[in-house]
Structure formats: structure tokens, C-alpha cells
Image (cartoon, helix red, strand yellow):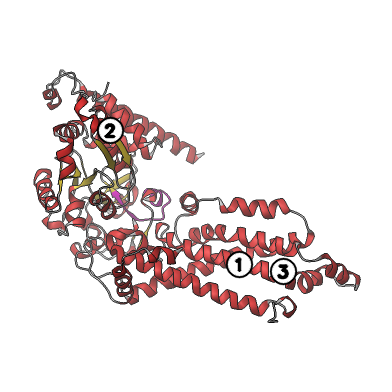
Amino acid sequence: MRSEFTRLRAGIALLLALALSLGVVACGSSNDGGTSSSEEGGSAGAIVSNPKNAKVSLTIGSKNFPESEITSEIYAQALKAAGYKVKTDLGLGSETIALKTLKQGEVSGYPEYTSTALESLFGLEPGEVPAEAQPAYEKAKAELEKDGLTAFPPTPFSSANAVGTTTKFAEEEGLKTVSDLEGKSESMSLYGSPECRQRIDCLAGLEKYYGLKFKSFHPVDIGLRYTVLEKGQADLSILFTTDPQLAAEKDKFVILEDDKEVFPAGNVIFITDQSTAKKAGPDYEKTIVAVQKGLTLPVIQELNARVELEKKSAKQAAAEYLKSAGYVG
Amino acid sequence: MTALILLHLPPGSIQGALEFIFEPQSSNVTGGKMVGGFDQTLELALTQLEVTIFALALSLVLALPAGLYLGHKGVGELLAVGLGNAGRAIPELALIAFMAAAIGVGTLNLTIALAVLGIPPILTNAFVGIRQVDRAPVEAARGIGMTEREILFKVELPLAIPTLMAGIRLATIAIVATATIAPLAGVLTLGDYIINENVYGENGVVAGAIVVAVMALTLELLLAALQRRLTSKGLKLSPA
């Protein structure tokens, strides 16, 4: 009985979120608003196919989680609409592996996060990562160019790790910020992805910069990060700020404010190599920059919801985005 | 398999992996904390051994009596062989995720998931091992007045040992190798090195693979020795 009721409520919340964000997408594409999308010229910035691009073949990669696959599919389908010959190679793995495939020329490019690039690929400390999207992008681009790579400008949305819990637990324990965990974390269990344990933008950072110790840390598959909270097994779980559950189930889950800025937020930048960028011509960067303009936080949360909660494919979610935002007819 | 993969690696990485097993190394993403080294490797390997033993014990408790009983009675071939084969097709990760909602993640979830992997070969081989025993000695045993229990344990079981042990060995190797997925279910095993190339680098991945391979080979050798001890003299190939 009870579980049916919760499922019903979740379903309603989801429908609401869907309706809301469809509204957002629709607003972004309306041409009477005088928003930045009108500067593309034409109706709502529809992508124009250029026959010159037909002789360029591109393979677009992605990392192994839904958000990366969705952004990758959006870029791939947009480039196809611009006339390129496009293949996708999704779910390559973590950033180290994705970057390796790019350097070996197996993919032409893939979406990466500025924060991940700077910290994990180039070894910066969390405090050294610029908080603003533009300087973070420029720093990452400068580092990439040393390797013969380059990056295109960042998406509007950014994503970060966050310490999350159930609203009920946060209220009981009086938790609003991560610092509120001081003196309490010793009796709390934390769940996160296997690599979280050793990462400075995850458990290692909570220990080093916040001085927190937890009763226990349990590694789990990223796909289980809400299950362990719902099941009451985890007191705290590492979530992502772009998670659809945070929008659809606002009364159920909450993230604690990262008041010491240990988890830098990263915007998505498309990383590619310089020779491909040169060969592919100006439409390569232009298409990617144009098509990501609609990717704000509510939109990416909605797209994540379609894949993670409604079990649609990343390809389908990306196609829906491109269509409803007017990039393809 | 593992040996083949290792052969294709650049020569430096084997050395790097061996260093990783014994000496802590620096990592890009840890903010200065060292990773790997003998203490961490030993701890992960012991956990891997622990979950392997739990899962193997559970598979034996569930599958061995059932296989022996059905084999002796000569019934339930569809169950023993069919269920055995179907069991091999269950994807482990999906099973862990499925059970996460019911019983949560952790050692219990993992033990059950790995036991699901161990049950099919033990069940099928116990059943087939008992069934294929020559009927003549079984009839003779019945003729001299042995009880059904005596027939199973004194005649059929000794003759079925080679087939039965082959099933147990298969199960053990499958379980110890698959226990590397444990870090996705809340338990830290050597899979931690293999899954997280970001943290441990290629040396860590190869180091994890080497230690798991060594553990699998060691368990295989121990079980082979046990099998030789359990096999009755009459069944052994004697030197000509």
C-alpha cells in the first residue's frame, strides 16, 4: 500500500517537473523574448546543413554516465544536422580513459567538465580551480593546448559533487552546510562511488579540508546513490548537483551547502584535438556552441530525468531536446 | 586469459605494477595522499578472500546436497541442469542493483550475488557426477543390502569425486574473479584498484589483475591437491 502511494507521488512529482521544464525549454526557443538565441538568425537558431562538411568524419565519445552521454548525443546529432558524417562511441570510461582514446585518435572529441579536467587531468588543488566558468575554461584550454588538444566554450549549466541526505535526516540532525557535520559525522555512514574514497574532490577532500571523520565509507555503484538513501542504509550519500531527483523529489532529498568550496562546480567543455578542429572547419565549434546554449540547470536535470528515471536512451533524450528547442526541424 | 593480457602490456607496466603492490605511490587526484603499497594490497586481498569463502560456502550449502540428492534419485534433471545453465546467464551487476533495493548493499548482498555464480557448476556437476556412476556397482551395493544413504556416500560419491570437484573448482575461480566487482556493492576488494584507474593509474589496474590472478591460481592448486586426496585409489591414473 504505502510503497504504491510513494510511487504514485513520485510519478506526479516527475510529471510536474516534466511539464515545468518543457515550459523552460519552450521559453528558450520562443522568438519573441529577445533572448540570446535570437542572435543566431533564422527561426530559433535552427542548424543549417553545410554540404562542405560532408567529407569530414567525426566520432563523438562520452564518459560512462548518463549526463555525459546526453551531452555527447546532443553534440553528435547537431553536428550531423550541420552536414558532418558523425559516429558516436559512448561510455568510454572515466576521464583518464576518455582522454587516452582522444589522444590515440579513436574519438574526435568528448564532453568533459572544467573542474574534472583541471583537477583530475592536470592535478590542480580544489582551491586553485576558478569558480567562474570562463576563467576555468580558459585555464583548461591552455593546459590542453600543451598536448595538441583544444576545447570549445562552456555550457550554461555546471555540475558538482555534493554531500546529500534525506530531508528528514537533515532536519533531525540540523544539517544545512557540510560544516554542520563537525562533531556529528563520526556516527554517520557515507556512501559514494568507489573512486570517491581517494579523491580530493570527494571523501579525501572532506577529510582534509573539513577535517571530518565518518563512521564508515561504503563504495557503491553510482547508479545506487539514491537507493542507499531511500533504503535508509546510508546517512549521507555523494550526489550530483544536476541530479533529476533533487528537482523531482525536493521534499525528499537535500544537498548540504559546500561552504568551504571543496567540490568545485564544473561546466561542460567539448574537448577535441587541434588537427581535427582545423580539418572540420568553423562549423564544428559554431554548431557545438550554438546547440549547448539551451543547456541550463533545469534543462539538464530534465534530460537526466528522462534517461535515469524514465529509462529513455540518451539518444532519444538528446533528439527531443534538439527538436523542442528548435535546433533541428 | 590474464596471462595473455599481461603479455600484451608494455614491459614497463609489469614492473610498475609490481612496485605498486609493494610500495605506496603518488596519485593525481588524492591531494597528496599516497595510494597502493603492501598494507593496502594485503587488506584488499584478504577482503577478497573473505567474500570468496562466504560465497563459496553458501553455494556449497545450497547446491551440493541438492545435487547429490537429485543425482541419487535420478530425478529433476531439468531442475539441476536447466537451473544450473540459467543461473550462469544472470548478470551479476544487475542482480546486485536489484537486491540493493530489497536488502541494501554490503557483504550479504554480495555474498548472495556471488553464490548465484557458484551454485550452477556445483549443482550441475554434482548431479551429473552421481548420475554417470556405473550402475553395476550401485546394483551390487543394493544387492548386498546397503541402505540408500550408504549407497550414496560409500559408492556413488567416491566415484563422482572428479566430476564434483571440477564443479567446485569452476565455482571457486568464477567467484574469486568476480569478487572484483565488490566495490560497486559496498565492499572493498582488489576490484578497487581495477575499477578506479583515475585514482590508481594503469599500474594499479595491472597490479589488481596480477594479485587476483595469483589468488585464483593458488586456490585452483589447493583444490586440485584436495581432489587428489579425496579421489579413491582405484580411480587414479597410475603410472604405467
Image location (x, y in percent) of residue B72:
77, 63
Amino acid type, callout 1: Ile
Q: Amino acid at mark 2?
A: Lys
Q: Position of residue A42 (x, y in %)?
A: 16, 19
The subunit letter for the residue under badge 3 reads B
Residue at image position (43%, 59%) is B181
Q: What's the amino acid at mark 3?
A: Ala
Q: Considering only vertical position in the picture, is A242 above or below B226?
A: above
Residue situated in front as seen by the camera: B36 or B11: B11
Q: Is residue A231 magenta?
A: yes
Residue placed at 52% from the left, 63% from the top? B175
Q: Residue furthest front?
A: B240
Image quadrant where residue A110 sits = top left
From the viewer's perspective, is B160 left or right of A249? right
Q: At numbered mark 1, what does the secondary structure look like: helix, strand or loop? A: helix
For the residues labelled 3 and 1, the Cα–Cα distance comes to: 12 Å
The C terminus of chain B: image quadrant: bottom right
Residue labelled with disc 1: B168
A192 part of magenta stretch: no
State the SS at label 3: helix
Q: Is residue A54 left or right of residue B88?
A: left
Q: Nearer the viewer, residue B210 or A258?
A: B210
Q: In the rendered view, does B223 fall on the left or right side of A195? A: right
Quadrant of residue B144 within the rendered picture = bottom right
Q: Residue at x 57, y 64 (%)?
A: B171
Tell me whether marks 3 and 1 sit on the same chain: yes
Q: Which mark is residue A85?
A: 2
